[in-house]
Amino acid sequence: MQVLVIGASRGIGLEFVRQYRAEGHAVTATARDEKGLAVLTELGAKALPLDLLDPRQCTALGRRLEGERFDVAILNAGVYGADKAAPSPPTEAEFDLVMHTNVLGPMRVLPALTDCLAQGARLALLSSRMGSIGLRTSPNGWLYRASKAAANSVLKDASIAFGGRATCVAFHPGWVKTDRGGGQAELSPLEAVQGMRAVLVRLRLTDNGAFLNHNGEALAW
Ligand code: NDP
């Protein structure tokens, strides 16, 4: 299988690379600094530089991926950003960092995938249950929540655009022990990624455009 992981220097993205490489799959993965690229190369992945905040690098990614046919594409990169509860406003810079990374980033990368998804491919965007409007009971982290709700909208549109060729889903990975999730989190990256990979394998065409927990359970938008 050919696998693409966007944002793979550490945490959940890196674990996707580890697990797919351990099974011998061909993995292309991105990182935004030399240290991250070296980690990926060490794992036997084809490492490409990508900072989602840099539009030129996103355009260059499209050229670098020309001719590839990915069976699995994981859009993982994301930031939590300023931890403010409603109605405490983010600054413009705080807003831009989170929205540009979590929303504009996927909107910049998805065009690069238009011609390099294999027929029957699976595409997953790492969203968050915090982005669910239907399940919401807390106003904390409202900037991150807004960004993941918007990212869900981006995934839904991608599922329509790519439907017929790829099955596209938004994932809540669980609460995962990473730099983002912290040490108190419930799942190891290994467990979370094993779960999501198993879900990707059993996706059916009718799952296109779904918002799923790491165990495959459907989540309310
Ligand atoms: P981490 O903070 O551990 O890792 C985030 C990854 O995103 C890093 O590889 C980071 O690269 C990359 N990244 C951040 N900004 C950019 C950028 N501008 N361009 C390219 N790459 C970037 O997060 P997790 O592994 O925990 O989370 C992965 C995804 O899962 C995220 O989208 C997150 O929102 C989501 N998620 C995680 C949860 C958890 O409990 N951990 C819960 C719900 C959702 P770099 O090393 O260069 O910073």
Image (spheres, grey):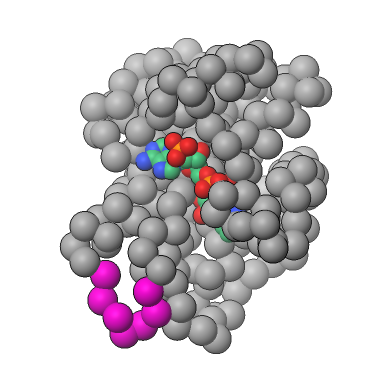
Residue 183 lies left or right of residue 103; in this view the side is right
Image: 154 above or below 18: below
Q: From this viewpoint, is residue 20 visible?
A: yes
Residue 23 lies left or right of residue 159; in this view the side is right
Along the viewing direction, whichever of 21 and 66 lies nearer the viewer: 21
Question: What percent of the width, then of the height, locates residue 7?
Answer: 49, 36
Residue beneath the point at 46% across and 28% down: 31
Question: What percent of the width, then of the height, locates residue 87?
Answer: 31, 85
Query: Residue at the left extreme?
Result: 92
Q: From this viewpoint, is residue 208 visible?
A: no
Residue 8 lies left or right of residue 88; in this view the side is right
Along the viewing direction, whichever of 103 and 70 lies nearer the viewer: 103
Residue beneath the point at 53% across and 70% down: 130
Q: Is residue 87 magenta?
A: yes
Q: Is residue 108 magenta?
A: no
Residue beneath the point at 65% across and 29% down: 17
* Image quarter of the N terminus: top right
Along the viewing direction, whichever of 201 and 164 lies nearer the viewer: 201
Residue beneath the point at 51% across and 84% down: 138
Question: What percent of the width, then of the height, locates residue 112?
Answer: 39, 29
Image: 160 above or below 221: above
Query: Residue at the front extreme?
Result: 183
Image: 91 above or below 29: below
Along the viewing direction, whichever of 74 and 94 lies nearer the viewer: 94
Question: What percent of the width, then of the height, locates residue 56?
Answer: 24, 27
Question: Quarter-wise, where is residue 85 in the image?
Answer: bottom left
Give the residues in magenta: 84-90
* Image quarter of the C terminus: bottom right
Query: How many numbered circles does the render carry?
Result: 0
Q: Main secondary structure of the magenta part?
A: loop
